[in-house]
Amino acid sequence: MRFKLTTKSGSIVWEDGKLSGDQKMVEKLEKELKMAEGFWVAPPSFCGTNTDHLNAPLSVLFLARELFGNLKFEGDPIPLPEGPEDTEGVDF
């Protein structure tokens, strides 16, 4: 899986858990991903991850948007994780 995130100041490419592109942006995002280890990363009211964020494309996208603001997304669609099984029959 591969996608590119572009801002006014540069771009980052995520491919199968690895970041490349504008070095300052990559370093800033990698630092944020490491700092988020053990914390829930997800848009409000949405499935997400709490560990291994660099390997979770949705977490990378969410934290990149928080850090860099509006982003142009190009690439493979990010698969959405399924909700927990215990939410069956619960209206959201």
Image (cartoon, rainbow, N blue to C red):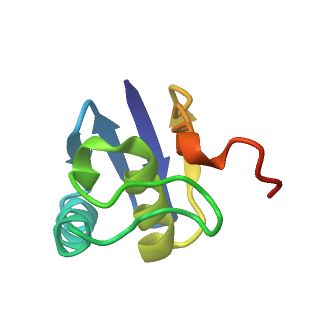
Asked if residue 12 shows in the view, the reply is yes
Residue 24: x and y in percent read: 21, 68
Left or right side of 28 for 1: right
Q: Is residue 83 visible?
A: no
The image shows a total of numbered marks equal to 0
| Left or right for 55, reference 88 | left
Residue drawn at 23 percent across, 59 percent down: 26
Front residue of 47 and 70:
47
Q: Where residue 13 sits in the image (x, y, percent)?
A: 33, 41
Residue at the (31%, 61%) spot, across then down: 50
> In this view of the protein, which residue sits in the foreground, 65 or 10?
65
Quadrant placement of the C terminus: bottom right
Q: In the picture shown, does residue 80 fall above or below 1?
A: below
Q: Which residue is at the front of the view, 43 or 60?
A: 43
State which quadrant residue 51 falls in: bottom left
Q: In which quarter of the image is residue 85?
A: top right
The quarter of the picture where residue 83 lies is top right
Q: Would residue 84 be found to the left or right of residue 24 on screen?
A: right
- Furthest-right residue in view? 91
> Residue 70: x and y, percent?
60, 66
Camera-side residue: 87 or 56?
Answer: 87
Above or below, comparing residue 67 to residue 91 in the picture: below
Point 23% across, 71% down: residue: 28
Expressed as whole percent of the image width and height from the top left, the position of residue 5 reads 46, 49
Residue occupying image coordinates x 37% and y 24%: 1
* Left or right: 64 as drawn, with respect to 24: right
